Image (cartoon, rainbow, N blue to C red):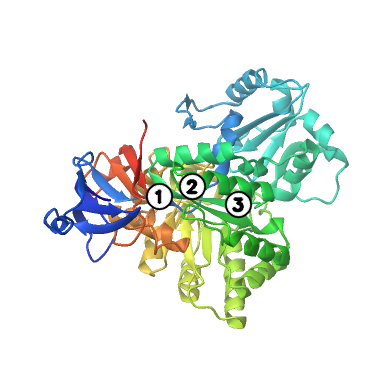
């Protein structure tokens, strides 16, 4: 059965035919795109006019986000910015330590007394001069363990009860356990090694909650609401339970997204990781794509755990933390590159970018590969020499455009200073050098919403309204490509999704306004009316 959808405008992302008014779908794939006249070739087709006043685009592709977005709403939200949860409830942002303490106390009262209190989203960088430590959490909750994830998910703060439960005052030799003025742990734990001391004491890691079918279903609902039809979980442990959950949800005909989990490299030795990937690859389906590996090098700039080149942090703070010794990180790149596996590499600071470009160049010299598509993720302050080097090495970039809004003011005044903020998220330079480009939200670090991400790339405004790096703006068409075909390319799925053309999956995002004709400042406000996945319409019914 062939169905033909009509629209006010279809933006295809197909350079051979950028626009159309009709699209024909058969067996979940695109049969034809064109004018009403061209559709007369299909005599047996039925016409569906429900979108005739709307704009159709390729389904959005979120190339860097995490299924934790579907799990963290089980816990208390303590963020500086307002957020909307999976059920559509809006949570006001908290603009003081006192407001955070009050909400934490209120939330703790709803949690079973035998369970730890887990919260997330707080960002102490917005409260300069007010040191967030265990004592600040003790004021809210002192009699039971509290674990509070910072917004960046690279740092957490715990109260005194949790320190005692984890025996952290007795732990030695672990980088990232911050000490107070008294020389004792003050409750802040930076990066994975330190954080896992808490997870070991709790008996579970929050990062393992992605192995829940309910988490994956909630994640998909959030994605669909924002127009996403292909989404990543870009740090998945790929446990047996987690793989079964992925198989189960994607086998459901009504599951509204395609899922690309990337295996967390540091959870496995390279030999074990490659064996794990081989075991998983035959278990995929049209909605589930195993294959990429995620490597976490450094941390977060606003969390002061990213690795920066000289002159390091603008306000003089110590340089950040490696999540593994630099040579080990390079060896991991070499192992997976030699095995023909694609790497997605977290590089927030320019020192970590330098290390990973060194590793990729060495790997290419030893084991040359065409079209490897290794993708550097975030890469917020890559300098121009690094960009030219990335272009020469065939590296893709997936840039964290949302950072411009959420932390642009902090970077300008505290972490990076004026000049580096002119190339913060170097989007236009990436395009000028013909480097494959995607942009992302890193949800749950920032809210999932590709049109907001595109708005950030086009407008480059901080939360206070300051413009950062006007020369690095994208045009609206370039930003739309970065959330569709560009992101699909970095996932090695551009032959299946990312544009509307014959043979590809019929994955469509339906918009109530045309992003090419509305004012650029309105991109973030365009409403997603529905999505179509494999020809099946998903909306808010």
Query: Could you say which quadrant of the image residue 333 lies in?
Result: bottom right
Residue at 47%, 58% (x, y): give it.
398
Residue at 64%, 37% (x, y): give it.
149
Secondary structure of the residue carrying numbered label 1: loop
> 519 or 231: nearer the eye?
231
Residue 18 placement (x, y as % from top left): 23, 60
Query: Could you say which quadrant of the image residue 327 lies in?
Result: bottom right
- Camera-nearest label, 2 or 3: 3
Instruction: Please state if 37 lies on the left or on the right of 335 as rendered.
Output: left
Secondary structure of the residue carrying numbered label 3: strand
The answer to whether mark 1 and mark 3 are in CB contact below 8 A is: no
Residue positioned most to the right: 170
Residue 408 placement (x, y as % from top left): 47, 45
Instruction: Please state if 169 lies on the left or on the right of 458 as rendered.
Output: right
> 10 Å neighbourhood of mark 2: few (<14), some, or many (≥20)?
many
Residue 444 placement (x, y as % from top left): 53, 41
Query: Could you say which quadrant of the image residue 197 lies in?
Result: top right
The answer to whether mark 1 and mark 2 are in CB contact below 8 A is: yes
> 414 or 47: nearer the eye?
47
Label drawn at residue 468: 1
CA–CA distance between discs 1 and 2? Answer: 8 Å
Label drawn at residue 152: none
Instruction: Examine the rendered structure and indicate whether residue 534 appears above or below residue 521.
Output: below
CA–CA distance between discs 1 and 3? Answer: 30 Å
Going from the N terminus, do you reach mark 1 or mark 3 first?
3
Tell me the residue that label 3 is attached to. Answer: 235
Residue 103 placement (x, y as % from top left): 60, 21
How many numbered marks does the figure carry? 3
Secondary structure of the residue carrying numbered label 2: helix
Label drawn at residue 412: 2
Going from the N terminus, do you reach mark 1 or mark 2 first?
2
């Amino acid at each position: 059965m062939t169905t033909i959808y009509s629209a006010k405008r279809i933006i295809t992302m197909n350079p051979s035919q950028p626009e159309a008014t009709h699209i024909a779908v058969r067996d979940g794939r695109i049969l034809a795109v064109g004018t009403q006249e061209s559709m007369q070739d299909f005599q047996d087709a039925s016409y569906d006019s429900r979108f005739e006043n709307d704009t159709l685009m390729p389904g959005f592709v979120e190339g860097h986000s995490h299924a934790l977005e579907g799990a963290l709403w089980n816990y208390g939200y303590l963020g500086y910015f307002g957020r909307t949860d999976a059920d559509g409830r809006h949570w006001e942002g908290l603009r003081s330590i006192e407001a955070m303490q009050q909400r934490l106390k209120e939330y703790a009262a709803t949690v079973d007394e035998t369970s730890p209190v887990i919260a997330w989203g707080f960002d102490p960088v917005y409260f300069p001069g007010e040191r967030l430590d265990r004592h600040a959490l003790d004021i809210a909750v002192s009699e039971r363990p509290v674990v509070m994830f910072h917004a960046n998910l690279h740092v957490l703060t715990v109260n005194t009860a949790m320190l005692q439960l984890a025996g952290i005052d007795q732990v030695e030799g672990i980088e990232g356990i911050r000490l107070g003025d008294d020389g004792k742990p003050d409750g802040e734990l930076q990066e994975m090694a330190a954080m896992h001391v808490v997870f070991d004491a709790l008996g579970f890691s929050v990062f393992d909650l992605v192995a829940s079918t309910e988490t994956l279903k909630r994640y998909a609902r959030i994605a669909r609401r924002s127009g996403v039809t292909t989404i990543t979980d870009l740090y998945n442990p790929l446990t047996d339970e987690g793989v079964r959950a992925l198989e189960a949800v994607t086998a459901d005909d009504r599951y509204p997204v395609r899922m690309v989990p990337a295996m967390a490299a540091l959870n496995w030795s390279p030999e074990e990781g490659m064996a794990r990937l081989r075991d998983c690859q035959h278990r995929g389906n049209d909605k589930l794509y195993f294959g990429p590996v995620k490597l976490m090098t450094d941390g977060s700039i606003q969390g002061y755990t990213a690795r920066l080149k000289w002159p390091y942090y603008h306000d003089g703070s110590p340089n950040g933390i490696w999540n593994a010794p630099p040579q080990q990180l390079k060896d991991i790149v070499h192992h997976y590159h030699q095995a023909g596996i694609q790497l997605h590499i977290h590089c927030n600071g320019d020192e970590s970018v330098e290390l990973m470009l060194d590793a990729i160049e060495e790997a290419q010299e030893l084991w040359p590969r065409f079209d490897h598509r290794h993708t550097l993720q975030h890469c917020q302050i890559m300098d121009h020499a690094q960009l030219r080097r990335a272009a020469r090495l065939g590296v893709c970039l997936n840039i964290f455009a949302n950072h411009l809004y959420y932390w642009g003011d902090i970077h300008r005044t505290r972490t990076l200073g004026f000049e580096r903020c002119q190339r913060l998220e170097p989007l236009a330079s990436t395009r000028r050098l013909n480097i494959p480009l995607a942009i992302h939200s890193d949800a749950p670090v920032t809210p999932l919403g590709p049109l907001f991400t595109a708005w950030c790339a086009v407008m480059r405004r901080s939360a206070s309204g300051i413009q950062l790096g006007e020369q690095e703006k994208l045009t609206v068409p370039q930003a739309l490509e970065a959330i569709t075909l560009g992101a699909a390319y970095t996932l090695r799925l551009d032959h299946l999704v990312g544009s509307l053309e014959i043979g590809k999956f019929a994955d469509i995002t339906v918009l109530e306004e045309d992003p090419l004709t509305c004012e650029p400042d309105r991109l973030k406000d365009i409403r997603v009316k529905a999505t179509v996945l494999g020809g099946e319409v998903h909306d808010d019914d």
